């Protein structure tokens, strides 16, 4: 794929031709397999990361091993933590891991700072992406603090359900997405299983009564 096509897929179409060329000359493409670590706590930020294809899961891990999902970075999106670390000159405080085979573009820090200084379009694009992601993180915090876990679990299962009625996820993964602990989520799933709403399988959950989950989700509104 040409550099121009890559820039278009990364939503850099608003840049003037001269600025697009500057970014294209400096950027470096990175291909990562599923499960690869993109960054980890304490690592320094080498540049601005934009995902071209795939998905990166960004999460924090406590001293006890408990994980909480902060957000995902999908195609055409930037990582707010990378942006914050880049401009704050701070090391990463969370972990980013690819969920599927992922292609990304790294724009070196020197190029990013140069573009921020000279390009209104680039500057707006960077901070627009930053603002959108901050809103997502605040929504995650709001859900964790103000909405019952039962309703959030039901909503997550409905969001992740496949065409065959199966949710492919471990209980630990669900707990991390919900900002809870596996033991609590296991108990919640056990109650739903006893009620005949779902059936737990190894590494997956089969939803038997999605309408019941919708009622539980609605109860948390």
Image (cartoon, rainbow, N blue to C red):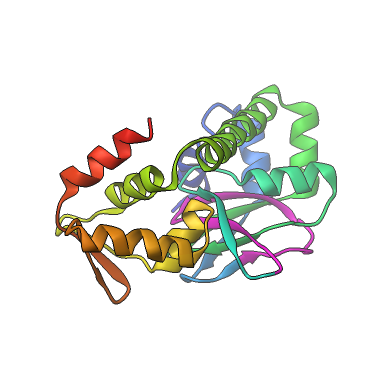
In the rendered view, tell whether residue 189 sits above or below residue 85: below
Q: Can you say which quadrant of the picture contains the C terminus?
A: top left
Which residue is pictured at 34% across the width and 44% down the height? 155
Is 4 displayed left or right of 66 in the figure?
Answer: left
Q: Nearer the viewer, residue 18 or 82?
A: 82
- Is residue 99 in sight in this rendering? no
Task: Residue 183: give x, y in percent of width and height.
Answer: 47, 67
Q: Can you say which quadrant of the picture contains the N terminus?
A: bottom left
Task: Residue 212: give x, y in percent of width and height.
Answer: 19, 45
Stretch of the chain drawn in magenta: 38-63
Is 90 covered by the magenta stretch? no
Identity of the residue furthest to the bottom in this view: 202
In the rendered view, tell whether residue 53 sits above or below residue 219: below
Which residue is pictured at 74% across the width and 56% down the height? 93
Which residue is pictured at 26% across the width and 57% down the height? 192
Task: Residue 48: give x, y in percent of width and height.
Answer: 68, 48
Is 39 covered by the magenta stretch? yes
Is 146 displayed left or right of 23 in the figure?
Answer: left
Identity of the residue furthest to the top in this view: 120
Identity of the residue furthest to the right in this view: 89
Number of marks in the rendered image: 0
Which residue is pictured at 50% across the width and 71% down the height? 35
Residue 29, by quadrant, is: bottom right
Task: Residue 87: give x, y in percent of width and height.
Answer: 80, 41
Is 128 displayed left or right of 177 in the figure?
Answer: right
Residue 117, by quadrant, is: top right
Is 163 displayed left or right of 128 in the figure?
Answer: left
- Is residue 165 in sight in this rendering? yes
């Amino acid at each position: 794929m040409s550099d121009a096509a890559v820039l278009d897929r990364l939503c850099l179409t608003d840049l003037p031709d001269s600025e697009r060329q500057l970014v294209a000359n400096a950027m470096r493409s990175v291909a990562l397999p599923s499960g690869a670590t993109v960054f980890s706590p304490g690592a320094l930020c080498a540049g601005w990361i934009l995902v071209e294809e795939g998905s990166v899961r960004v999460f924090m891990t406590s001293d006890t091993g408990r994980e909480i999902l902060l957000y995902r970075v999908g195609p055409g999106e930037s990582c707010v933590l990378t942006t914050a670390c880049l401009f704050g000159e701070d090391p990463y405080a969370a972990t980013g891991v690819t969920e599927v085979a992922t292609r990304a573009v790294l724009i070196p820090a020197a190029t990013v700072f140069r573009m921020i200084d000279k390009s209104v379009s680039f500057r707006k694009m960077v901070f627009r992406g930053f603002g959108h992601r901050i809103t997502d993180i605040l929504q995650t915090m709001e859900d964790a603090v103000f909405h019952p876990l039962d309703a959030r679990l039901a909503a997550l299962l409905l969001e992740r359900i496949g065409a065959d009625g199966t949710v492919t996820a471990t209980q630990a993964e669900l707990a991390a997405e919900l900002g809870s602990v596996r033991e609590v989520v296991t108990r919640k799933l056990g109650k739903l299983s006893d009620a005949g709403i779902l059936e737990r399988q190894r590494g997956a959950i089969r939803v038997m009564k999605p309408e019941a989950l919708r009622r539980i989700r609605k109860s948390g509104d």
